[in-house]
Image: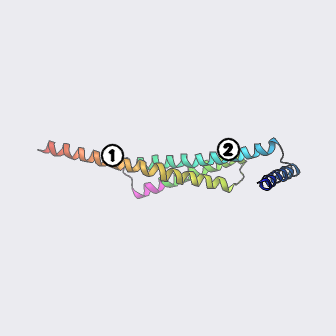
Amino acid sequence: MIGKSLAGQIRVIVMLKLFELSGMSGTRFSEAVFHEAHACWRSLLAGILLMMLYDLLRLFRLLVKHSAGMVGVEDVIYWVFASLAVFGLFYLENDGALRFYMIGAVAFGMILYDRIVSTNFFRVLKKAGRCFRIKIRKKTQRQSR
């Protein structure tokens, strides 16, 4: 028990000495970690917001019929916007430096939103659409009699 505690204390002392030697001691290290964590959080949020925007586009497509060509044009416009938004995020957070964990956080945010919110949202929309279709059919059948 005492040996494990002593080994843990030695590891902490060694790590502190390494940070001092590397010039990352004190508040500078914690500020750098905070900045990177903040950038990761904003990347995750950007992915969620991009998928929300795409869901709005999908909802618009459900309400207004589109040709296949128009769907393609809308997708290209969306993905150009999404790439510019992600580049803008990288530029503002890291002066344009490419951080793969930020790309991963954007992708994870998109997947997270798609799997949790989007699938349930469109499932509810389909059920609501069926309900409205049934009500519309009943009204048209009553009016035709």
The secondary structure type at the circle numbered 1 is helix
Name the spot of residue 84 as percent of width and height, x first.
Answer: 61, 50
Residue 60 highlighted magenta (yes or no): no
Name the spot of residue 10 as percent of width and height, x first.
Answer: 83, 53
Residue 71 highlighted magenta (yes or no): yes
- Magenta stretch: give its range: 65-73
* Residue 88 visible here: no
What residue is shown at x 28% (from left), y 46% (from top)?
A: 131
Circle number at residue 128: 1
Marks 2 and 1, how far apart in space? 39 Å
Tell which residue pokes out farthest to the left in this image.
145
What colour-coding does the image apply? Answer: rainbow
Tell which residue pokes out farthest to the front in this image.
1
Residue at the disc numbered 2: 38
**Which corner quadrant holds the N terminus?**
bottom right
* Residue 11 visible here: yes
Of 7 and 123, the residue lying toward us: 7
Of 96 and 127, the residue lying toward us: 127
Local packing at callout 1 (Cα closer than 10 Å; few below 14, some 14-19, many 20+) is few
What residue is shown at x 46% (from left), y 57% (from top)?
A: 72
